Image (cartoon, coloured by chain):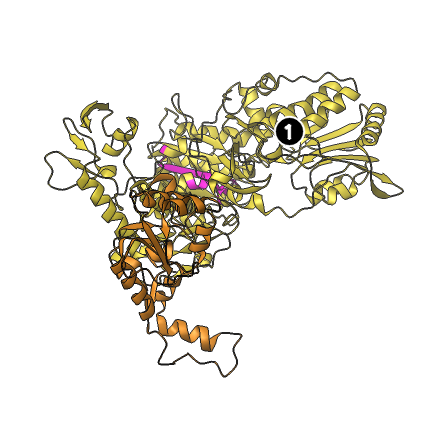
Amino acid sequence: MINLTINGKQIEVEDGTTVLNAARQNDIKIPTLCDHKNLTPYGGCRLCVVEVKGMRVPIASCTLPASNGMVIETETDSLKKSRNIILSLLFSERNHFCPFCQVSGGDCELQNAAYDEHMTHWQMQPQWTNFPVDTSHSRFILDNNRCILCRRCIRACAEMSGNFTLGVEERGSATIVVADTNVPLGESTCVSCGSCVQVCPTGALIDRSSAYLGHDKNMTVTRSVCRGCSLGCGIMIHTRDNRIVKITGDYENKNAGTLCETGRYKTLDEKRTRLTTPMKRVAGQLTATSWDDALTILASNLTSNKNSIAALASTRLTVESMAAFKSLFADGLGNDVVTSIEEGRPTALQAKYAEANGESIEGKLDTLRTADCVLVIGADLSETHEVASFYIKRNMPKGTRLIVVDPSENGMDDLANINLKPKAGTDEAVFDAIEAAVIKEGLARTDAKTSKVSLDVALSACGLAEEDVIAVAHMLAEAVAPVIVYGKGVSAFGGEAVMDAMVRVAKLTGASDSERRGILSVKGEANSLAAAQLKMDVPFDVKNRKVAYLAVGDDFVSKRLVKALDDIPYVIVQASYESALTERADLVLPVSIWAEEAGHALNTEGRVQFAEAALTGPEGVRSNLDLLNEVAKLLNVKLNDDWRTALTARTSVVEIEM
Amino acid sequence: MTKPKISSDWMAGCSGCHMSLLDIDERLLEIAELADIRATPITDLKEPDESGVDVGILEGGINNSSNEEVAHRMRERSKILVAFGDCAVFGGVPALRNMCGTQEALQRAYVDIESNDESGKIPNDPELAVMSNVRALHEVVDVDLHVPGCPPDPDVIYYVLKELAQGRMPEMKDENLHWH
């Protein structure tokens, strides 16, 4: 511990604490601009200068480590004068005229800092130079005229998304923020995650979609969970007049504010037509009807076909809804085809494996933070689970190495230290080959002496070159904390043998041992793991069924799924949007979308998170859970509402934290 | 005690600050009770008393020789000079033309503008004021109080006038400090 004095107050802080954070921990306010709690201190704006006894000049507190016996002052007249000059200089460098800036009036940290210093005017007038405005990007605008060169965006691009697109060009007051080698943002390597916009303290980076739609003070902010994929990133939904204005990353969640384009922007691109009234098929035409009528038809239909229902639910629904769905159709009505829209493709294999072995083999996403070598197989993380790719990419400059195994093109190919392009469907042989290579090279971190198959046999099965596999063996086994990340490519097409082979390689290379579980799978949609735990992971086999009940919510529906319903006499669809599926349906029940429902989500690493409802649904729609409860009541089925127990009834591939 | 004299004028602005002043509504009567409102653009008297006023208020930046004259005259005749609104305080919206320069702005406004035909030309009557870069009031004369805002909120204006009318200097901070 370190003892220091700030403004006459004795303070004790942990070793390694900066003076700025020491002050904050003790409710002493030091103004800052370039500092951001989720980014590495930079010391660029100098607004946080403090006086340190014995030091010649004021020093930036954000980069100054606290040390024993330090005597600090933060509010002397001379410091106040310095801050005023620092702010004046910042204002004078660019066009900081507030009236026509989107963040003016509460959301601008520069303006707020000036207010805090009681600045009524600028000591120095601007230098009247035009700086470039980059409007080439479809999601946001970069206006260098509003920039104070704090480099938060640059740090966010590197430290949050690991993309390293943003940087600076020129020097001194001519410095500008550029993408790549000063190409237009829209043509750059930017992945549109928008973290730069979220951290920008001024109006230099603004969203196209949310600009000028109101200040934060006019909005209601709801803490929620992204339903874009199974990673379960924490989000903040900013709403105004029952409409989502923007989504930002939740700094307090595990993702520490990081989001991808899907989570921040694509969710708001919704163009589908909303369903607001129940519909039934009359003389071949879907016709609007009342809820009473729809539910009467539904009840009589389900009652007379009780055991002949094929039921399918979206994995974007809340855990509560999914558990109710399972309880209604499987336990209550006695059907065996009660599954999810993913039909277990991203999860069934590992779920069976974990159950058979009675062991959770997978670790938590946090292992990626410390991983110094990552092997990704059967997944294009940059496409399907982009934030996981950020977790890997941002560590690469620190020396983390990446091996990508994918028969087809993969979004992370360019970054990989080694690309393996095996024959399609030979993941087992790939693991066998790595196992054999590790043993052959004497790199095994267990006492295993023999591999399951010889290197030659495995290599000819997967079609990889020996030298490549040997290189992979070295990279993995010589790493301190290697991690294997696998996806749907492995679980959808492999059998138990590929899981076995993967676990063997994990143990052999030290990815998994008694201390650590360095295997992760990214699974599929938001509640993919919950579907597996509820055993809603079987193929949607509709053969000889009389009724299909599909609770797809706001999910997208594949053509294949609609086609599968060709021979079903009666199709009931519980959905939020019009689709090819609702066109095929005989009875359509309108339900709320994700942001209109409160409930839990279980992410890929077994973390249960609560998401609050941010919007009120349109009149006439019901929540997925309310509707299922109502149907159960009509059919006299008692639903099991203990979803927590239901989720943990079978051994999970990853430990579930309630 | 005689009531303090208050006078105002406007320069390169949109007169919005004076409109905001009128938006203090019935509280104007209160101010009129406390102070002697002299020349303003919205009263009959057009120039501040030669004998001087206690408070001079100026809206707008300074964009030509005429504005300069107004600024100097008000400075000379007032004990306390107030820069009133973002244009007087910072230069404001008119100052954006400094980004391209006065000549280019004139060319765009009078000649190149889409609504013009061939006959468009930049006014060059020798009696016209000589244009300059747009400057904040404090770049031209000393300013005693800055009241930013685009326009300043009526509540802020009321507070400022009430304080000045009673011989106190307003404190521009917290709720009373807004630039936009």
Colour orange, chain: B
Verify whether residue A507 appears in magenta: no
Verify whether residue A380 appears in magenta: yes
Which residue does the image show at 34% across and 32% down from the upper left? A443
Which residue does the image show at 49% across and 48% down from the upper left? A410
Q: Which amino acid does the dot numbered 1 rest on?
A: Asp
Q: Is residue A97 left or right of residue B144?
A: right
Residue A83 appears at what percent x and percent y? 24, 44
Picture quarter with the N terminus of chain A: top left
Residue A117 appears at what percent x and percent y? 29, 42
Say which quarter of the image contains residue A189: bottom left
Q: Is residue A101 left or right of residue B62?
A: right
User: Compared with residue A17, is residue A193 higher up or lower down, i.e. above or below?
Assistant: below
Magenta stretch: give its range.
A370-390
Q: Is residue B178 visible?
A: yes
Colour yellow, chain: A
Report the residue that reaches farthest toward the right.
A283
Secondary structure of residue under mark 1: loop
Say which quarter of the image contains residue B129: bottom left
